[in-house]
Image (cartoon, helix red, strand yellow):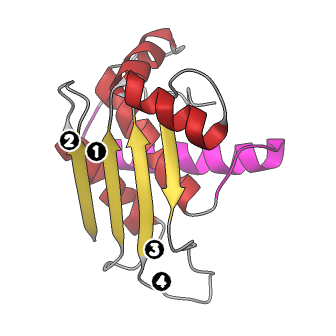
């Protein structure tokens, strides 16, 4: 798996954890090991510009996903998805920090960025949360991936609750 993490935000973030959880999520979703992903961490100003440009919504957001090859998880009959370019995930640590402190189970900015990374990966794979059934599926899968990753690392305490909208 080729995953690049580029921190352009000016904020110190746990880039290794972002890389590790992205790799875990893609492996769990059985995405081809030669697929490529880019994760970019930006400041609130840059995220706000992207949010306005692509969603026509004001203010910065927590995560945005820009799919490239529209890869999907393989069906039960397939071993793995074809290789390809997944796309870009853009994260904003300033929004992540605020969401982490406001969440029912308060958690750190880095824990929120890990959750948002998984959320972004799922969006790149075609998952959405516009409809209640889609939201239940996506957020359930998101929680299972984050919980599995945390368990493998022996991390204790509650997993971050979904705070993404």
Secondary structure of the residue carrying tag 4 is loop
The image quadrant of residue 84 is bottom left
At a point 48% along the width and 37% down the height, the residue shown is 63
Proximity of marks 3 and 4: CB atoms separated by less than 8 Å: yes
On the image, the x and y values in percent for residue 97 come to 37, 17
Q: Earlier in the sequence, mark 1 or mark 4?
A: 1
Residue extent of the magenta highlight? 127-155
Which residue is disc 4 drawn over?
Answer: 80
Question: Which is more toward the observer, 158 or 6?
Answer: 6
On the image, the x and y values in percent for residue 77 come to 62, 89
At a point 51% along the width and 43% down the height, the residue shown is 64
The image quadrant of residue 93 is top left
Residue 29 is at least partly visible in this image: yes
At a point 50% along the width and 82% down the height, the residue shown is 81
Which residue is disc 3 drawn over?
Answer: 30
> In front of the other: label 2 or label 3?
2
Which residue is disc 2 drawn over?
Answer: 15
């Amino acid at each position: 798996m080729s995953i690049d993490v580029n921190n352009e935000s000016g904020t110190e973030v746990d880039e290794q954890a972002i890389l590790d959880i992205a790799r875990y999520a893609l492996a769990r979703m059985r995405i081809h090991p030669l697929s490529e992903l880019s994760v970019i961490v930006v400041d609130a100003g840059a995220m706000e510009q992207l949010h306005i440009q692509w969603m026509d919504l004001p203010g910065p957001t927590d995560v945005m996903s820009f799919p490239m090859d529209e890869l999907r998880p393989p069906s039960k009959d397939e071993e793995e998805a074809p290789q390809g370019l997944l796309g870009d995930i853009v994260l904003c640590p300033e929004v992540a920090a605020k969401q982490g402190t406001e969440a029912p189970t308060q958690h750190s900015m880095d824990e929120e960025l890990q959750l948002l990374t998984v959320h972004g990966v799922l969006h790149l794979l075609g998952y959405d949360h516009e409809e209640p059934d889609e939201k239940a599926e996506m957020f359930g899968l998101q929680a299972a991936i984050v919980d599995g990753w945390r368990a493998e690392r022996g991390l204790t305490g509650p997993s971050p609750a979904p705070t993404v909208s």
